[in-house]
Amino acid sequence: MKMPEKTLFSIITIVNKEKVYHNFKKSLERQVGVNYELIKINNDDNQFTSARAAYNSVLESANGNYLVFVHPDMRFQDKNALHDALAQVVKIKNLGVAGVSGCPDKVHHHRSTLVTSIVHDNPPHRFGKLIDKITEVQTVDECFFVMKKSFCEAHPFSDIEGWHMYAVEQCLVALLNGRRNYVVPARMWHFSTGSSENWQYIQTGREIARRYGDYFPTISTTITTWETQSWFNLYIIPPLKLVKHEVWRRLGINKK
């Protein structure tokens, strides 16, 4: 699958550890067949209080037809990995947000289902439902996601503080504007263990439920399912699930 050669991608990453960024850049430079510009957002002195504010700061200066927001601890598993992922994205009609990991809106036994094809942690492992084709979802994970610049300019990131669920929120905004969100198969490696989820994650989730709960009775994310109409499921269940996921990470449960 090829994409138009003139399509330009702005690859945007927030950096607070130079070594991590250096390794990401080396992995990116090995990629072939992608016309891109790399936009580094320095946050080594905590210049920004949120990922949303950091990303908004470069929207106007980004030149790409598509904006690719990526964590600097993402790696590409072969030289064609980025091209093959983005080639799928540009073929999507009515695109809202595309990612490489995410959750459909349907829940099973009050739980969201993670769909993905990437690996996590070091040594790498998989978790969630493995996909081999473009899959429609409600929300995507923040580690790697793509939007058209025109959509992002019309709907910049919100004013919610912190470093969580900003891709989730953009997905909800996309759905409210008649767009659709997808996960595409990708040969990528996310070094993160997911241990960045903390109490701020819970606070952000509750704020998103407050803002969007009238439109979405459930919001599916990779950590928990937010049942926005239930006090019990907003204030009791998420902290318990956060503890459960931390225990699972420490014990290595869910690794495949």
Image (tube, grey):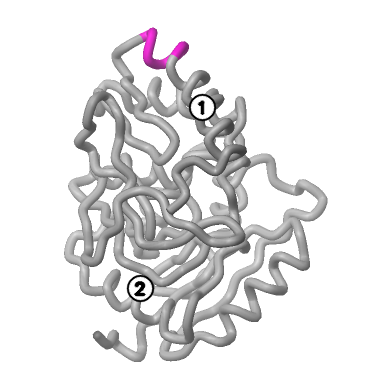
Tag 2–tag 1 contact (CB < 8 Å): no
Q: Is residue 76 visible?
A: yes
Range drawn in magenta: 231-236
**Which of the two residues, 180 or 75, is positioned nearer the viewer here?**
75
Disc 1: CA contacts within 10 A as few (<14), some (14-19) or many (>=20): few
Disc 2: CA contacts within 10 A as few (<14), some (14-19) or many (>=20): many
Name the amino acid, label 2: Ala
Task: Give x and y (percent) for residue 210.
Answer: 40, 20
Residue 121 is marked as: none
Task: Give x and y (percent) for residue 36.
Answer: 49, 81
Q: Quadrant of residue 183?
A: bottom left
**Mark 1, residue position:** 244
Relative placement, left or right, of 42 versus 172 is right
**Which of the two residues, 134 or 203, is positioned nearer the viewer here?**
134
Name the amino acid, label 1: Lys
Q: Quadrant of residue 88?
A: bottom left
Looking at the image, is 183 positioned above or below residue 82? above
Tag 1 or tag 2, which sits nearer the N-term?
A: 2
For the residues marked 2 and 1, what is the alpha-carbon distance in whole angstroms? 32 Å
> Closer to the observer: label 2 or label 1?
1
**Mark 2, residue position:** 85
Q: Quadrant of the N terminus?
A: bottom left
Q: Is residue 58 visible?
A: no
Farthest-out residue, right: 45
Residue at 29 percent across and 85 percent down: it is 3
Residue at 24 percent across and 66 percent down: it is 132
Residue at 22 percent across and 63 percent down: it is 134
Q: Quadrant of residue 172?
A: top left
